[in-house]
Amino acid sequence: MNCEELRDWIPLYGGGELQPNERIAVESHIGSCASCAREVGDYRELRACLAPLRDGEGAPDLWEGIQQELFPNRTHPFERVWGLARYAAVWVAGVGIGFAFYTVARQAVLLKSSVSLESVRASDPVRQDPGQPKGRVVPAGEGPGEPYEVRPTWPPGFRPRGFVEGHHLPRVERLIGANEEVRF
Amino acid sequence: MPDPEEVRLLARCQQGDEKAFREIVDRYQRRTYWIAHHMLGNYEVSKDISQEAFVRVFKNIRHFDLRKNFYTWLYQIVVNLSIDYFRKRSHHKTADLEEVEEVADAKPDPERAADRTEVQGRVQNVLHRLPPRYKAVLTLRDIQGFSCEEISEIVGCTNATVRWRLHRARKLFKAMWDGEDVEVGEEGEEAREL
Amino acid sequence: MHVSFLLSVLILQDRDVLLEMERKVQAILEKVRPSVVSITSRHEVKDKTARKGSLRLSGVIVSTDGLVVTEASGVEGADDVSVSLWDDRIVSGRDLVVDQPSGLAVLRIEADGLRPAELASEEGVRSGCFAFSIGNAFGLRGNVQMGLVSGLRRSIFVGGHVLDDMIQMTTPVNPGDAGAFVANSEGKLIGIVNSRYSVERSWVENLFGQDQAGFRGAMPESVSFATPAGAVEFLLRRMSPVRKVSRGRLGIGVRMVEGGMRGQLGLPVGVGAEVVSVEKNGPAARAGLVKHDILLKFDGEPVTDATGLRRKVTEFMEPRKVVLEVMRQRNIRSIEVIVEISNQ
């Protein structure tokens, strides 16, 4: 088989997607063809660049957005406990203070608790972070200040890793003046 | 074969159990996010799409056949949402990104170049220019490591189509990576330079 | 094909001129393309993250036994160099010789059926001559550009070094074209692409929040430089088996005295090269030459051309004592200097 015929199989060789007979055909060809061997190597290198991308760090926690969408108006269990605790603490304080007043002002007529329960609500809503988008797809162009095309951005704190490549052409930093000095 | 513990979790989700679903989200969110990210390139959009995928999963969980693989279904939704995202936008071409490769100075200075040109940045630049369907198979196979069979389930096409798309995707990716000027038209019709 | 011929044809047969020109250019391409190669040089950057780098550029085959010439900085310090021929054969490049003063590098490949470039004679190269570049801009094989020679003997500061005697041309060159074939209208090699003058680069933040090359200021157009074929020929001739390039030198920089000044000093027409710089501890410095000295005679011959003098000196094969006739403060004196041979 020649290069032309194998052209379509070469990209699939390194990933193991070829049938056994196809794989053998490619293998026997690259034994004698340097350019196809080189191409196989190139594809292998590219796969090597792609594989490490699999599980990067920095993936955001999605739960909050999902919860807003699926289970709204439900207080956070912790908040509920906290609300209850506050409620209870207020009662204890109220009783304590009332008792103190009672003992201190025993002769006095006042026995009224100085804490009004209406000022504490048992279920304060969960603090909203305004920056948190809701679990809804915002098409580009409709979000506030969103550019009309998808801007590539990384998760905050994500650090990509490196590889250097380029087409080479030196850049002249400075033209040396018209006096045309000749050095030797 | 689905993992029995997972099947139990999913069964509870079918009953509307929030805690069980949260567990499912915890297990799959990272991979889901990165699949979306490699398709879309943008953090906010990827996050939104990932969340949307999970929301849809929960809303339809009652119709899910517990004998099947859950992840296939989840990633199917993610990939479709990502592809749809591109379709919805009026521009098919994504932002014209500067090639992150350097117009090289006289000497490739390793210290300087190291921080500036990053493979992940470069990969994203190139991936970004691939048509959505090619991007999907390339991401699923070469980045996420799914088998061709799994991919054909996720993407919803035959094994042969997956193979064909994969070989086109890799060729296109390589051409762009090598810095060749490739005109990308509709999928299946790119005009290729030398 | 000469410009004058073109003009006469233009006058006589207007509409066929373009066709004729096209055919000539195509003939040049056909002749030149097989001599142009694509070079990939790989550099292992050894640090914790084990990054790798590779550069792609162009090169020209200059001998049937496998010598390839390219631009120096693209291959300097490479761990391996691979060369891709016009028929897609890929071979390894070995025995790399880098010659900084000319901005050239030479390497050797093993292959048969090579088509070396034909070097043009230097006298033919003048401002206004056609300069076609055939290279691998951005990996596009055999990419051709057309331009004119703007000037000769230009000096530029590139990659931290000064390069003298460069051809300046309007031919556009792009990344990947370093080392490309610069052909005249006969398809002969007049130079090797070296660099281009482009805007001052600065680091700007790209969309990833990373530093990326960006531009600041006015953008030069069509100012490119090539190492002349004469330097290629010198290099091939003076390259030793131990892969060093030897050239004679004095450690001096001169420029021809301007007309007005020549008259003031009473110098004969066309004679006199003023010393502009003297290298510390170089042969000229040790001989006592200083800035503003005017060289009148070198080794008994009148100094009429700075570049010619440079050639003479670089051609020395062995160290030798030479007598210079020098004018200093209007007094003429003889100074002895020893031409040194340096090995790069």
Image (spheres, coloured by chain):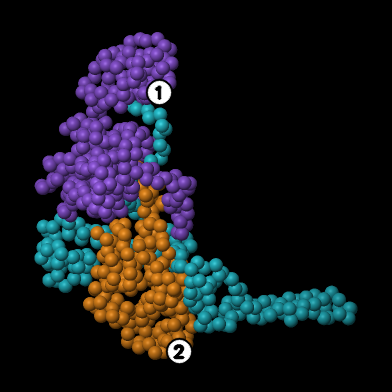
Which chain is home to disc 1?
C
- Mark 1 surroundings: few (<14), some (14-19) or many (≥20) residues within 10 A: some
- In the image, A99: left or right of C130? right
Give the chain of mark 2. Answer: B
Give the answer, above or below, for where B43 lies relative to C112.
below
Q: Colour of chain C?
A: purple
The picture quadrant where one finds residue A94 is bottom right
Residue placed under numbered mark 1 in the picture: C258
Q: What kind of element bears circle 1?
A: loop
Toward which corner of the image does residue C330 lie, by quadrant? top left
Chain ID, orange in image? B
Amino acid beneath label 1 = Glu
Judge the density around disc 2: few (<14), some (14-19), many (≥20) Cα neighbours within 10 Å.
few
Quadrant of the frame with the C terminus of chain B: bottom left
Expressed as whole percent of the image width and height from the top left, the position of residue B174 reads 28, 61
The reply to whether the C-beta atoms of the residues labelled 1 and 2 are less than 8 Å apart is no
